[in-house]
Amino acid sequence: MASEAFANALRRYGGMWGSAWRDGRMLTDVVQVTGTTQRGRIEVPLVGQQRVGYKYGRLSSEGSIAFQKIDTGWELDVFNAITLDVDELRRRRDAGQFGTLDGTFDLLLKQDDPHAFGKEVWQLVGCMIWQLDVGINIADDFIQREIPLTYDRAEPIRTFRVTDGVVQPVHTLQ
């Protein structure tokens, strides 16, 4: 019994085996990505009662990305996306460069702990960063920033379920 508990402890995911990918390239500066997809709640007054009911509302998807500063890549991407003036947006639109209008990108998130039951992969589609943080702190041993992001949707690429010690794939697109 004790060895089974020890073996099960090994199966827990360790965060150091996670990675984030953009455009097929591992982002070695990204140390954390969080994402929450949440269903809105609409309050519905119930006639003749002293309480309210609820119904499902719209979905929202928000999170954050934390990175260690290696270069100015993230700052430049955010700066370029949020500071385009109207004339440049119109020029790109008229040239058919729609993909460069909004600064969206996709993030592939992999969790591949060799001790865990399996590999997990999710994709955040249509990520947008809305805020640019710059500045200095002379007390920092290294610079790490965390910036909020939104995304259109999360897609399970590779997931699994463990039932009675047997790994059963749920999604296996990768």
Image: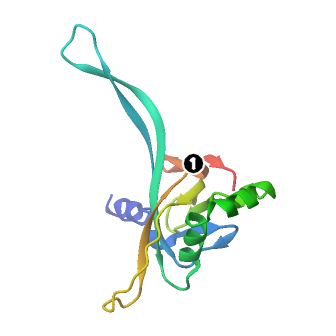
Q: Amino acid at mark 1?
A: Asp
Q: Is residue 108 above or below residue 49?
A: below
Say whether residue 102 is left or right of residue 134.
Answer: right
- Residue 13 drawn at (x, y percent): 45, 64
Q: Quadrant of residue 97?
A: bottom right
For label 1, the SS is loop
Neighbours of disc 1 within 10 Å: few (<14), some (14-19), many (20+): some
Percent position (x, y) of residue 63? 45, 57
Percent position (x, y) of residue 173?
A: 69, 51
* Vertical placement of residue 144 versus 9, above or below: below
Give x and y (percent) for residue 78.
55, 69
Quick check: 127 left or right of 45? right
Q: Quadrant of the C terminus?
A: bottom right
Residue 161 versus residue 96: which sits nearer the camera?
96
List the residue tagged with mark 1: 152
- Whether residue 15 appears in this view of the structure is yes
Against 139, residue 20 (above or below) is above
Q: In this view, which residue lies farthest toward the front?
A: 87
Residue at horizontal 21 percent and vertical 11 percent from the top: 49
The residue lying furthest to the left in this view is 50
